[in-house]
Image (cartoon, grey):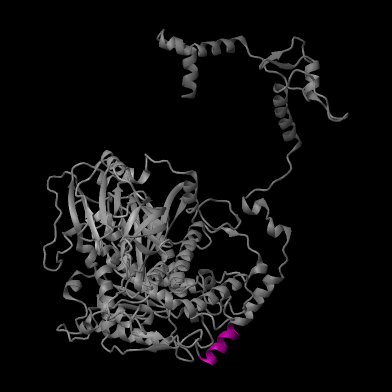
Amino acid sequence: MDPNVRFQPLISSIQKVALFETKAKLYLIGSNSKETRFRVLEIDRRAPELSIYENPNELEKGDIRKFVQSRSFIRSISAYGVLGFVKFLEGYYLILVTKRTRCAFIGKHIIYTIKDTAMIRVNEASSKQMHPLEQRYVKMFNNVDLNSNFYFSYSYDLTHSLQYNLSAPKFVGSRCDIVKDEPLVWQNRTGEKMTYAFRGVSRERFVWNAFHLKPMRDVVHKDWMLEIIHGFISQSSISIFGRQVYVCLIARRSTRYAGTRFLKRGANFHGDVANEVETEQIVLDGNRMCSFTQLRGSVPSHWSQDVSKMVPKPQIAIDLSDPFGETAGKHYQRLMFHYGAPVIILNLVKTREKRRHESLLSEEMYSTVSYLNQFLPPHLRIRYIDFDMARKSRGTGNVMEKLAKIAETVIQQTGMFYSDDERSQKQTGIVRVNCVDCLDRTNTAQFAIGKCVLAHQLYDLGFLKERKLEFESDCITMLENLYEDHGDTLALQYGGSQLVHRIKTYRKTAVWASQGNDIMQTLSRYYSNTFSDTEKQHSINLFLGYYIPSKAEVNKTLHIWDLETDFYIHNSRFDEIRQISSIPLTQWVSPFVMNCLPAAVSDENRVVKELIKIHSNDAEIIDYYSNFHYDYKLTSFEEHIDYQLSHLSRNLAPAFRSHFSPFEPIRRQQSTALKNPSLTGQSSTSSANSSSSDRSDDESESDEEEKSSNNRNTAPSSSTNSSRAEDPVTLSSMFPMTNDIYGFEIRMPKKADMLKYEKYAEINRICNSTGEPARPSSPHQYNRHAQMNESGGLSIYNNEIIIASVTPEKDIQNDIAIPTVSDESIAIYEKYCMLKHTIMYDFRCDPKILEYVNMFA
């Protein structure tokens, strides 16, 4: 692409919304952040269906003032965006964002999280009685908490990766055909810098309010439609000797085949998998940006677990045989379309068990990948990595080191995205991590990959000499906290509880006190899966528009809670899917995608809705500086402090350090008595075998192998832990010597040094005197100031030091001789004071002054 051609996304012209309500109509007044441009929507409340009219012209503040003053309103609500409309049985409801908080930024693009919403009834209630099930649907809809983990931005497309958002547009118009149409070629032969503003096309898979925005589509201006994503976004900073480098973690949860843990397993017939989350790790240093994208998702086949029996670990069953891998083929082709090749699968599911449970999924996945790879050229084949994480974490095995080696291999094959003013490189390919639930083990593996990626990112930015970062450093502690919050949030959304096996569990640094917390999380997950997941699944299906309530006679008795299964809801067009296709099954990757690989088709063929040429960089639609800094707005102290504190390191453990590099490991103070006394080195919750599906239980391998493993690892671990428990806590262990930490030893000062210090301190006592002798606090205390005053000495009067006429007695040991200034030195000082006058008016300089100036020049 020509470096003289720049592309900037449009800033939404509607960032503030005011709702004015009357009995007959609703008026929505939207404005930009500075409240200089306004648009007006008018909604008829008495119409049987949704009736929206928008004034096609932009209005000014004076016009809006006259408009508001000319009408009387029942109430008014201020908001920050319109999320759309929803209808159940009796009419439409309007959803507004009423509170927001800034949670991160990418460049000059601000990302907000929703803190509160309002749901306003649009259609006026008729005289007849409301449908008795209307409130039940409203309550079920509100079970999806919009105030938690929903995010939006007015200028940045959160549904796409940073690499996609910085790529050049190739097609304009949402109805263009990237296969048949000719792409745009950007060549600026004049050499002048050109700027284009564009409105991008969102990836609907990650837009959680896409169904609610449908009534507004093609009716109102596009800036009215505020798209939100669901998942996790958090940002922290690394202080590299005062220079702030920001690390942002963005997790996008898919809307396809979305649901809860035991009710959504495997994949549907479209290749959409359960618990699919795209995680992007972004590092920002001014105009230099790095990013790496990885994916988690369930095993792409048709499998489930029977939850009718109340058992902790329901048996896994393969519901439908897929000998030609059609479902998996659709899934992997979509990954190649959006991320390129190679697709690397990191399978963390158990491979060897005494009683077959998880190994069924490993066998199914391996056979499918082996079959599909037959029809791909060698350099584009799917890379399959089998890593039984539960088994390898037993005993003294170091899981993190093994995962680090895998992560290094992944980065070498896929690369990562980097962009600055001079060069750019792209990530081609994706690593797909999965276990059974895609929660505990998956999050630890993604952290291991993210740790290795962060070292590469900081190396490319010039902050590291080698691509390596150590645990217990400020940098990795910050990243570990990010991934812990990332895992907890996704586990709550899918599994109903926070992580049971955390990163510290697999690092074997979890304290024994964490066992109680792990057990509580296990019980919380079990309770949620057993009693509340069904209601939560109904709420998700209703929120995403998979189930639409109707008052028709056909559906009068068939409500969402009456459905035996939601199979046909998530497998729409099932009859079309089962039809015989003319495309052979061996061609599971389309030729168009194949020709573009290893690059991603979506990145190389970017589609935008609009493209506008900008003649001035100060145009408001791309003025990111004013939109980011808010130079016209006062930020409250509480809001500013709350945002700043969220970026600080949350690791408050005391540390002894003699350096301030965030890349060096720190000796942290830990109590050995709180160490986990487990002899085998397993998780603190390993005694509760009935708690989690991610636990390595006695069924992981054969009895003989398990006994030999225990015999090898139990003895040394027992001796090590027992010796640690018997080590006494002494004063020297809690407070080490300064020589061990800082390299020098504190000693008592010498007598001569103390005498010098006393003489120095005497000057302050003399100069701060009031002219009267001070009385000693004890009869034996020596008062030097009194002797100085008695012998003449110094006195202070009206803030002036006065020298007494009496000649003081010279006592070299006890008194301080007052220096005398010669007449020659006084004359030089007077000439210096006249320096300005001689230079400014006489245009000369005394040669004596020049001599001193040249001496220090």
Quarter of the figure with residue 509: bottom right
Query: In the figure, residue 804 lies in which quadrant?
Result: top right
Residue 713, position as x, y percentages in the image: 59, 81
Residue at the (47%, 46%) spot, across then down:
640
Q: Is residue 381 visible?
A: no
Is 377 on the left or on the right of 185, as rendered? right
Asked if residue 706 can be seen in this view, the reply is yes
- x then y, percent, for residue 264: 38, 79
Q: Is residue 690 magenta?
A: no
Instruction: Name the one closer to the observer, 526 or 242.
Output: 526
For image coordinates 58% across by 53% down, the residue present is 657
Of residues 825 and 270, the one nearer the viewer is 270
Q: Which residues are magenta?
A: 702-712
Q: Is residue 704 magenta?
A: yes
Task: Where is residue 375? Give x, y as percent.
Answer: 22, 82
At x 48%, y 49%, the residue is: 644
x and y percentages locating residue 428 in the rendered image: 28, 67
Residue sitting nearer the eye, 357 or 58: 58
- Asked if residue 603 lies left or right of residue 816, the reply is left
Using the image, determine if residue 770 lies above or below residue 271. above
